[in-house]
């Protein structure tokens, strides 16, 4: 039996997953930057929706326990987006939503 051939697809799958994760993080980062521009212009509702879209792109990676989210950069980007989203909610006086976003970010990136 050719064990190398049997397990080479696992390595290929891991490489493809890593490439996909990095692409999702890059896309989420671009969407986060769009949200930042909207926030700076005071377009709070649109910024909130944009930040939520960024989170949606990386949600599975961001919320994944263990090192996978950290390795891909999703944890750092997700925490930044959540904190920006919390700021939007604070400015809109949506206290509970702000607390949830900030708590989620701290759970992933406690420092």
Image (cartoon, helix red, strand yellow):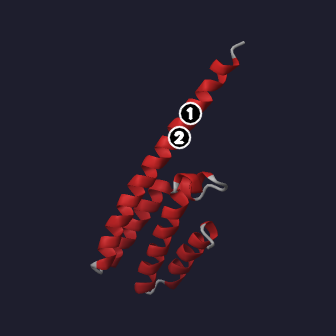
Instruction: Quickly name the residue at label 1.
Output: 13
Percent coordinates x, y for residue 19 in the rendering? 48, 42
In front of the other: 103 or 76: 76
In front of the other: 79 or 56: 79
Give the side of residue 92 with respect to residue 7, left or right: left
The local secondary structure at tag 2 comes to: helix
- Cβ–Cβ below 8 Å for labels 1 and 2? yes
Instruction: Quickly name the residue at label 2.
Output: 17
Which part of the image, by quadrant, shows the C terminus?
bottom right
Q: Estimate how packed mark 2 is, as few (under 14), some (14 to 19) or many (20 or more) residues with alpha carbons within 10 Å.
A: few
State whether residue 46 appears in this view. no
In front of the other: 3 or 91: 3
Query: Can you say whether 11 is above or below 83 in the image?
Result: above
Q: Which residue is found at the position 36% from the left and 61% from the top?
A: 31
Per the model, the C-alpha gap separating discs 1 and 2 is 6 Å
Percent coordinates x, y for residue 84 in the rendering? 44, 74
State whether residue 66 appears in this view. yes
Q: Residue furthest left?
A: 41
Residue 110 figure quarter: bottom right
Which part of the image, by quadrant, shows the N terminus?
top right
Q: Which residue is found at the position 53% from the left and 73% from the top?
A: 101
């Amino acid at each position: 039996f050719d064990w190398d051939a049997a397990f080479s697809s696992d390595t290929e799958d891991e490489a493809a997953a890593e490439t996909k994760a990095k692409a999702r993080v890059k896309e989420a980062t671009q969407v986060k930057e769009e949200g930042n521009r909207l926030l700076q212009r005071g377009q709070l509702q649109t910024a909130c929706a944009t930040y939520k879209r960024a989170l949606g792109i990386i949600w599975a990676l961001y919320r994944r326990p263990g090192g996978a989210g950290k390795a891909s950069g999703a944890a750092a980007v997700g925490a930044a987006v959540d904190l920006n989203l919390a700021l939007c909610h604070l400015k809109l006086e949506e206290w509970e939503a702000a607390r949830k976003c900030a708590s989620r970010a701290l759970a992933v990136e406690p420092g």
